[in-house]
Amino acid sequence: MSGSLDEIRDALHAWRWRELPPAPGRTNHLRAGVAVPVQLLDGRPQVVLTLRPPAIPRHADEICFPGGRPDPSDADLHATALRECEEELGVTPSTTLGRLSSTPIYTSEWRLDPWVVGLDQAPLHPDAREVAKVLRWDLDEVVGGKPIEGLVVDRDGQTKVFPIMRMEGLICYGATAFVLYELAEALAAWRGVTLPPMDVGTLDWRRLMIHHAWADDPSRRPHDAEAQRDRYV
């Protein structure tokens, strides 16, 4: 069943987003406004994400949404999300469809405040300083029954299963993956279907912390990314 931007808007209007509590041992008091861009491709909703370059100061070699800390000129975090989308992807969102839960980042004091935005069919012009590659995630595949892979993580004496998504041989994980999963949940709830249980895989959390999006095949990782490794070991 193919979606539309109007259907996603309706689904988000019916969805109750939440202020999720801080991660264990964190305050997550710092807020980043992020855009979750959706563009229709052959009638199917595709979420647009970016792979960060290896040499940037924060979140190098990770799959992220366009977003960042607010500028003094931003009226609010929604304005931050729209500005960051335009700066990073070179396109202005045509509409705001709704928002998702404020989601803590487990590895820092930041949290993501995400707004789902619609993009028209204009080509993207990503900023090479912030975007190494543009990636797309087919929302209909998951809502239609494709299982999401689960990553087993032992934290604070508890075993939890976190979602991860594979895109063109790369791994999306952490807060970004949680936001994607919630978007799929919202659309599934609107359609009256249930997402399949997570299919727990064998990927290791520590391996992700070292190799990030390249964890499946570190040999493909750009050579200059190795300079970032010591921060995560």
Image (cartoon, helix red, strand yellow):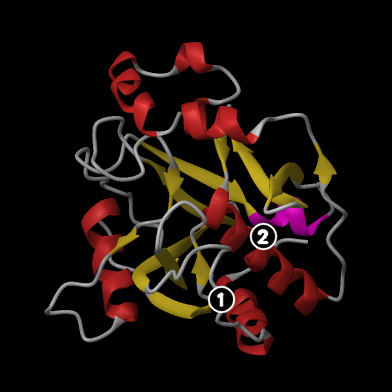
**Does the magenta segment cover residue 140?**
yes
Q: What residue would you read off at disc 1?
A: 101
Which stretch appears magenta?
139-144
Quarter of the picture holding the N terminus = bottom right
**Does the magenta segment cover residue 9?**
no
Quarter of the picture holding the C terminus = top left
- The residue nearer to you, when weighing 138 against 56, is 56
Image label count: 2
Q: What residue would you read off at disc 2?
A: 181
Amino acid type at circle 1 is Ser
* Pointer 2 local density, CA inside 10 Å: few below 14, some 14–19, many at least 20: many
Asked if residue 41 shows in the view, the reply is no
Q: Residue at x 32, y 79 (%)?
A: 77
Percent of width and height locating residue 115: 45, 74
Find residue 194 and report its image quarter.
Answer: bottom right
Tell me: 4 left or right of 93: right
Amino acid type at circle 2 is Tyr
- The residue nearer to you, when weighing 152 against 65, is 152
Q: Which element is circle 1 on?
A: loop
Asked if residue 143 shows in the view, the reply is yes
Tell me: 195 left or right of 181: right
* Pointer 1 local density, CA inside 10 Å: few below 14, some 14–19, many at least 20: some
